Image (tube, rainbow, N blue to C red):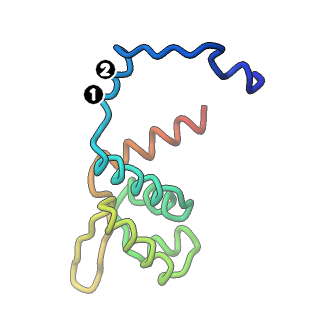
Amino acid sequence: MPEEKDLICETTFIDENKVNRVKKQLPEEDILLGLSEIFKVLGDSTRLKILLSISYTELCVCDISALIGVSVSAISHQLRLLKNSRLVKYRKEGKMVYYSLKDDHIKSIVNEARKHVEE
């Protein structure tokens, strides 16, 4: 493992061409804030279990509760956070409410992170 001193440049030189090129590629602050919020929401293992579970098929709150082993009330709270973050959507059928991922982007984010951890 490298020592901290090995991770810092020994001289000060700024490649302004690179810095300017990268700066143009960075998103606006409001986009960065939105990204930050998504990663905060994804930073909870229960919410990740919910997202992984509904990435396979749509499930109702009771199904998710039984699958994850957390109360219906707790699952409802987590689903509300996920819905407010636009990560999940729901569909009502009679008295049942079914949840699924908002879109394939969410599935990709979670699956790519999972691959990274499993490597």
Badge 2 crowding class, 10 Å Cα cut-off, few under 14, some 14 to 19, many 20 or more, is few
Q: Horizontally, is 18 left or right of 50 in the view?
A: left
Q: Quadrant of the N terminus?
A: top right
| Front residue (pair 100, 116) | 116
What is the x, y in percent for residue 9? Answer: 62, 17
Q: Please say if 98 is above or below 96.
A: above
Q: Please say if 78 is above or below 105.
A: below
Badge 1 crowding class, 10 Å Cα cut-off, few under 14, some 14 to 19, many 20 or more, is few
What is the x, y in percent for residue 44? Answer: 54, 61
Q: Please say if 61 is above or below 20.
A: below
- As helix, strand or loop, the secondary structure at mark 2 comes to helix
| Front residue (pair 35, 51) | 35
Mark 2 belongs to which amino acid?
A: Arg
What is the x, y in percent for residue 24? Answer: 27, 28
Question: Residue shown at 51%/14% (left/top)?
Answer: 13
| Front residue (pair 86, 1) | 1
- As helix, strand or loop, the secondary structure at mark 1 comes to helix
Question: Residue shown at 46%/55% (left/top)?
Answer: 52
Label 2–label 1 contact, CB within 8 A = yes
Q: What numbered label is drawn on residue 21?
A: 2
Q: Residue furthest front?
A: 12
Q: What numbered label is drawn on residue 24?
A: 1
Question: Residue shown at 52%/56% (left/top)?
Answer: 43
Question: Residue shown at 39%/70% (left/top)?
Answer: 81
Q: Please say if 23 is above or below 96.
A: above
